[in-house]
Image (tube, rainbow, N blue to C red):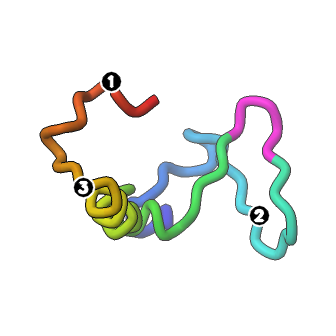
Amino acid sequence: MVEKGLLPSKEVARWRATIGDSLLFPQLGEAVSFIDFHEHGFMILALDFFRGFLHEYSVELQHLPPNMVL
């Protein structure tokens, strides 16, 4: 992912890979992220869910003010 430009180097961002780990236990100050999120710009995976959410509750995007969902 570094070669593709999706992640900065380990020295810069201090990330670690968990390939082969069956359970993820983030250490203090760490966040879990998935390759698909980086490859799709953090938006493609949520699109179908969000459309389904809007349809299920019969709302449109303009009905949701920015601070409504916490």
Amino acid identity at mark 2: Thr
Residue 25, above or below 44: above
Where residue 2 sits: x, y (%)? 49, 62
Q: Could you tell me which residue is drawn at 38 percent across and 56 percent down?
A: 42
Mark 3 or 2: the one toward you = 3
Q: Which residue is mark 2?
A: 18
What number is the disc on residue 58? 3
Q: Is residue 58 shown in magenta? A: no
Left or right? Give the position of 64 relative to 68: left
Please, what secondary structure does the residue beneath circle 2 have?
loop
Q: Which residue is at 86% across, 63% downward?
A: 23
**Residue plotted at (42% across, 59% down):** 6
Q: Of discs 2 and 1, which sits in the foreground?
A: 1
Percent of width and height locating residue 59: 22, 49
Asked if the residues shown at circle 3 and circle 2 are in contact, with their CB atoms under 8 angstroms apart, the answer is no
Residue displayed at 17% across by 49% down: 60
